[in-house]
Structures are given as C-alpha cells and as structure tokens.
Image: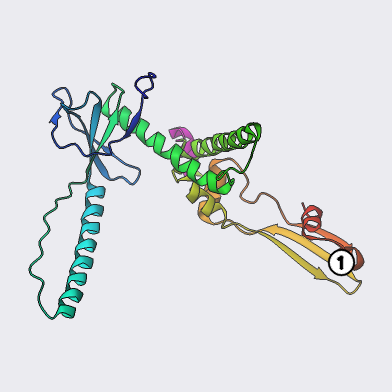
Amino acid sequence: MLSENDFDYVCVSRSKLKNYTIDPNSLPVEIQDKKKQKIQLQKVVSEKHNNFFLKIDSQAKRAKEVSMNNRFQEGFEKGLSIIAASLEKKSGIKTEEKVYGGTYFLRTSLEMSEEMIWMIYNIIREIEYSFRTLKTDLDLRPIYHKKDNATMAHLHLGLLAYWVVNTVRYQLKMTENETDKKQKIAENETHTEPINFQWKEIIRIMNTQKSVLTVSQNRYDEVIISRRCSDPTPKVEATYHRLKYKAQPFTKRKSVVHKSVFEKMDVTDLQKLVT
C-alpha cells in the first residue's frame, strides 16, 4: 500500500532474512549508538524482495539475547527437574543449539547511505517513543469524543505537544561551539555537555524539583502562607541551563490572611494567593 501510493518508509524487518548476499557496492560501516556501543551497518540483497535491506550487527543486542537465552535455559532446566522428581525418573538430556548473533534488518524503499538510513530510523523511533509518553500524559487514548471535530481537536493537541517536546529536546541536544565551551570551562561552568535523554526520563528528572507550600499561624490569628521551590539536583540544574532558564522558576512567595478568611479558602485559592 505504501509503495502503491509512492510513500517511502523505513522499518524493522519482521522476518529475519535467511538467504541474502552482501551488496557488492557496500562496505561495512561502523558507528556508535547513544551509549557509545559499536554497531556495524551494511547493505544486503535478497532475491525474494525488491526492497533495500540494511543489516544491523549490534554487540549490545548480542549480549542481551545471550543473557535472555541463558535465563530461558535455566528456567527450562528447572522445570524439567521438577517434572523428573514428580515422575521419579530422569527425563533425558536436553540440548539447545540456537545461536544469537545480535543481528537484525531494516527494510526500506530509500536509496541512501547506510548512515542516513540508520539516522532516519532512529528519528522515527524517538518520535514513536515520545508519542507513547504523551498519549499517557495527555490522556489521548482511548478517545471518548463522539464528534469528529472534537476528536481532531484532541489529536491536534497531541501534535502541538510533540512540537513542544521536540523543541525542548533539540535545545538540550544542541552542541555548543568550541569558543563558548572553552569560556564556560574557564569560568568553572560544568553544564557544557549535550543532554540526550528520552522525554520520559526528562520528565522524571524534572519532577525531582518540588513546589513546597507551608502554612502557619501567629498569635494575631493571622495565617502565613509561603511557597518556594526545592533546590534543584545537578541534572535539573543542567537541564535549566541548557534551556536558558533559572535554576529556580520563582523565589519564595509569602502571603498573610486572617484566620477567618483562610478557613473559607480551598486548595485552588491557596495556590492563586502565592502565585
């Protein structure tokens, strides 16, 4: 359907290629992921498909799959031992000879370099991950609206939210030029490195800074209401710095009201009083 409508695509191949050959015009390209782990890219050709395939060989994925396989074997052997004990006989020797190479394939209609295809694929992954987080935070699904206009407004809210997320993450990942970086190092400024966290992790980090509301009463029947921000952690401070915000969005705010007035106030009134 995508091809018939002239849409390009990049996706993970759900079926692992068995019969393929290395593209004679492609040389293996070695890059690093966000965690500085080595990944090897190389284009391959399959006789059964007319698409382009990019072979991804990841050492980290290989280690993960070996670990998963070991856990599976341990659980399977434990289960066999329980069965053998219950039947009072041995169940024979079990062998499993599956080799995990840490290899998977990207399928695409794009005729581009290995690095460009890999970059586009990772951009798509980041977009999908951000939308999954936003769908929960903004309660975008399930949609309970009955009219199309209301449904579209809800979806547009999600799109606008993603633009905000993308802008924030772009500013956090932006690399400072060497002149500014050297100047900040000379001034003992420590927040010079790009921040490349996923949106969910950024939310978790920023939620460590809290707004504290304190209520007390003096002997004149006056209620003192104060609100202040907690001190930011180093990661929160670094995030504020990259976005050019103050480390504390507001200073201490204080308000005094009579006890009779305070007793008639709700939480919303309190927040407005010290905003």
Q: Which residues are magenta?
A: 175-185
Q: How is the image coloured?
A: rainbow
Which SS class for mark 1?
Answer: loop
Q: Is residue 241 above or below residue 54?
A: below
Q: Is residue 99 left or right of residue 175?
A: left
Q: Is residue 20 left or right of residue 268?
A: left
Find residue 162 and report its horizontal and vertical position in percent.
Answer: 54, 37
Find residue 163 and report its horizontal and vertical position in percent.
Answer: 55, 34
| Quarter occupied by the N terminus | top left
Residue ID at (58%, 35%): 155
Residue ID at (20%, 66%): 76
Residue ID at (13%, 81%): 88
Residue ID at (7%, 67%): 93
Find residue 222 and report its horizontal and vertical position in percent.
Answer: 89, 68
Q: Do we see residue 76 in this rendering?
A: yes
Three-letter code for the amino acid on which mark 1 is drawn? Glu
Q: Nearer the viewer, residue 87 or 229?
A: 87
Q: Nearer the viewer, residue 30 or 234?
A: 30
Does the stretch in magenta take in 183?
A: yes
Q: Classify 10 Å Cα crowding around label 1: few (below 14), some (14-19), many (20 and above).
A: few
Q: Do we see residue 188 in this rendering?
A: no
Q: Nearer the viewer, residue 130 or 235?
A: 130
Find residue 38 and report its horizontal and vertical position in percent.
Answer: 25, 43
Does the stretch in magenta take in 145?
A: no
Q: Is residue 210 above or below residue 77?
A: above
Report the residue marked by disc 1: 263
Q: Is residue 92 left or right of residue 213?
A: left
The image shows a total of numbered marks equal to 1
What secondary structure do most residues of the magenta stretch adopt?
Answer: helix
Q: Nearer the viewer, residue 227 or 75?
A: 75
